[in-house]
Image (spheres, helix red, strand yellow):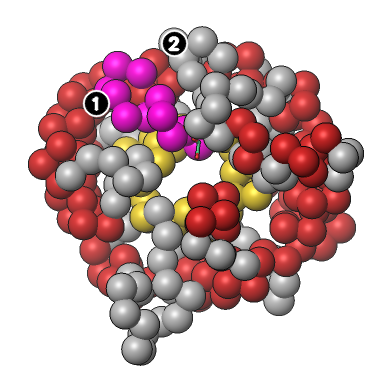
């Protein structure tokens, strides 16, 4: 059984003190869940959020984990303004979001840099949430399956099966991110099955079936149940609705 993962990507929101205040409101609201809860603050808020999660995990045995939103494609060196996998590991970050469409779109992140980041993160045993998804023009042209399969293949190029552990994929159609439009649960399910088939062809069925595939794109308290009812949707990667403790806890507790 794949455990459900509800992950909040805060993007360019929340200062360190706002992040801590959020964690203090969130933690009591999600202390009874068996779902895995992940929050992805900005780099500078990571230490404070990790401390807040640690305090709560000790006190309540909850399932809150902390992820970074990005990392450098290089381990170290002369790359001004970048953050290394080594720094993330030292802080105790669980995983990193790689290849979010906003990185691909606004920061020219290529399939090859996504591949380099994925390999580097796994080399250091950092978990990865790999984002893939087609844009509106690609969906309307009937190319969504092909585009997503190519993104998956490029991201996993040269990645050994042994490194796939601690890896999740988030299918996020670009046209659904921050727009209020969601893929129908049937369309999302179909794409998740397609991603699993792509992975099975690259590796094997067992690996493809073991990997968690999250859906992202305007997930809200009023549409999450329907999405999570699909057998191949293993969780959600959430932007807008992850910013308020009341909304995000409603997402985490969708099965209550
Ligand atoms: P959204 O963002 O929930 O605001 O659509 C999702 C994401 O970018 O991960």
Of circles 2 and 1, the one toward us is 1
Q: Is residue 75 visible?
A: yes
Residue that appears at 76% across and 62% down = 153
144 vs 157, nearest the viewer: 144
User: Is residue 150 magenta-colored?
Assistant: no
Please give the label number shown on residue 53. Answer: none
Residue that appears at 58% across and 72% down = 113
Please give the label number shown on residue 256. Answer: 2
110 vs 198, nearest the viewer: 110
Task: Give percent across and percent down for residue 108.
Answer: 56, 65
User: Is residue 241 magenta-colored?
Assistant: yes
In this rendering, position of residue 117 left or right of residue 110:
left
Task: Give percent across and percent down for residue 57.
Answer: 22, 39
Give the Cα separation between the discs numbered 2 and 1. Answer: 16 Å
How packed is label 2: few (under 14 Cα within 10 Å), some, or many (20 or more)?
Answer: few
Q: Earlier in the sequence, mark 2 or mark 1?
A: 1
Task: Give percent across and percent down for residue 104.
Answer: 57, 58
Task: Find the magenta span and give its range.
Answer: 237-247
How packed is label 1: few (under 14 Cα within 10 Å), some, or many (20 or more)?
Answer: some
Kind of element beneath mark 1: helix
In this rendering, position of residue 196 left or right of residue 141:
left
């Amino acid at each position: 059984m794949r455990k459900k993962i509800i992950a909040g990507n805060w993007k360019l929101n929340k200062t360190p003190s706002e992040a801590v205040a959020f964690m203090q409101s969130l933690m009591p609201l999600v202390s009874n869940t068996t779902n895995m809860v992940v929050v992805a603050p900005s780099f500078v808020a990571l230490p404070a959020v990790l401390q807040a999660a640690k305090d709560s995990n000790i006190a309540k045995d909850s399932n809150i984990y902390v992820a970074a939103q990005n990392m450098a494609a290089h381990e170290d060196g002369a790359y001004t303004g970048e953050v290394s996998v080594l720094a993330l590991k030292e802080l105790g970050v669980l995983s990193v979001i790689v290849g979010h469409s906003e990185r691909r779109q606004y920061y020219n992140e290529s399939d090859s840099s996504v591949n380099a980041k994925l390999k580097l993160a796994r080399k250091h045993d950092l978990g990865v949430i790999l984002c893939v998804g087609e844009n509106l023009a690609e969906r309307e042209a009937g190319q969504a399956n092909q585009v997503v399969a190519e993104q998956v293949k490029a991201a996993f190029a040269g990645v050994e099966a042994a490194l796939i552990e601690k890896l999740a994929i988030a299918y996020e159609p670009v046209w659904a991110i921050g727009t209020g439009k969601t893929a129908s649960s049937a369309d999302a399910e179909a794409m998740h099955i397609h991603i699993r088939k792509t992975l099975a062809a690259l590796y094997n069925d067992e690996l493809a079936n073991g990997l968690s595939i999250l859906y992202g794109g305007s997930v809200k308290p009023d549409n999450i149940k329907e999405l999570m009812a699909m057998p191949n949707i293993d969780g959600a990667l959430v932007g807008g609705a992850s910013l308020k403790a009341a909304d995000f806890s409603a997402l985490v507790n969708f099965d209550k």
